[in-house]
Image: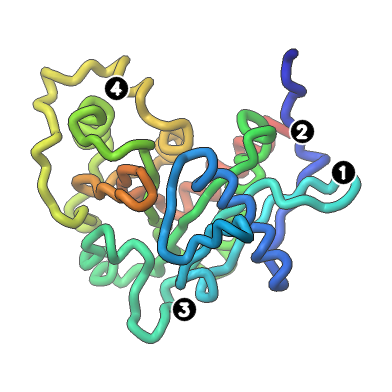
Amino acid sequence: MPSSPPPHLGCLSTRLAASAEDLRAAQALRYRVFVEELGGDGPMVDHDARLEQDAFDPLFDHLLLLDTTGAERVVGVYRLLPGDRLGPDGRFYCDDEFDLSSLRQSGRRLLELGRSCVDPAYRGGAAMLLMWQALAEYATARQVDILFGAASFPGTDLATLAQPLSWLHHRYLAPPELAVRAKPAHLGHILPPEQVDERAARAAVPPLIRSYLRLGARIGEGAFVDHAFNTTDVCILLDAARLSRHAKSLVARAG
């Protein structure tokens, strides 16, 4: 039986989480996607309540995508942490995965992205475009210069992921002044350019990362293997002004 098409923009809206109930709804969606669908786990995941949560949640703003048809439902989530709102230890979530020294020393206003997910029934349509528009507006309002965060490949075998990771490294590596590096910073999985099958490598890149690339993203050096989440992560870096231009254009065409 064919699935119904994703909803159009008129059925969807975005806002920041404004209550404990909003946050639980976001964490419940994250559980369905990251734990049930992708096989992830973590020390604070509540399997009984079916909530994917961690110690950083109270620091972040949570951008919600809502289906407003009937009772309002959370169908998409982005977690957002401005650089002027770090916790007592001054750490971003990504500090455990990447060396962010270059970003901190750049003098630019930073916004960390994370835990991006969309309900399976809403993928492939206008949902992500609307979230990008809201993300661009959030970044503009806070005068953000650079957005960054971990973006994931499913699985933890670097040898299996060597083709797409090598293609990203050779085609989309961030400039030296933004040289974020994975911890540890080994690059043994990176193949020489002549050994990269570009068509196969591109096809193996997850859709969200390909979408970031279309928005002008660059990639940090190396990859972090997250065994708890069953993923291999690269660091995505986005210029805020470019995101704003692209997001507005894409949403206008989709609307």
Circle count: 4
| Residue at image location 25% in from the left, 30% down from the top | 161
Helix, strand or loop for disc 1: loop
Q: Amino acid at mark 3?
A: Arg
Residue 69, label in figure: 1
Colour scheme employed for the rendering of this structure: rainbow
Q: Residue 71 vs residue 127: left or right?
A: right
- Callout 1–callout 4 Cβ contact below 8 Å: no
Q: Which numbered dot is residue 7? A: 2
The single residue placed furthest to the right in the displayed view is 70
Which residue is at 90% across, 46% downward?
Answer: 70
- Tell me which numbered mark, 3 or 4, is placed earlier along the sequence: 3
Query: Residue 106 falls in which quadrant of the image?
Result: bottom left
Looking at the picture, does residue 215 appear above or below residue 139? Answer: above
Tag 1 and tag 2, C-beta contact below 8 Å: yes
SS of the residue under disc 2: loop
Image location of residue 137, percent across then percent down: 61, 58
Amino acid type, residue under disc 4 in the picture: Ala
View extreme (bottom): residue: 88
Q: Nearer the viewer, residue 9 or 1?
A: 1
Q: For marks 2 and 3, give the CA distance.
A: 35 Å
Q: CA distance from mark 4 to mark 2?
A: 31 Å
Q: x, y percentage for residue 103? A: 28, 64
Residue 85: mark in rendering: 3
Indicate which disc residue 26 carries: none
Cα–Cα span, label 1 and label 2: 10 Å
Q: CA distance from mark 3 to mark 1?
A: 34 Å
Q: Secondary structure at mark 3?
A: helix
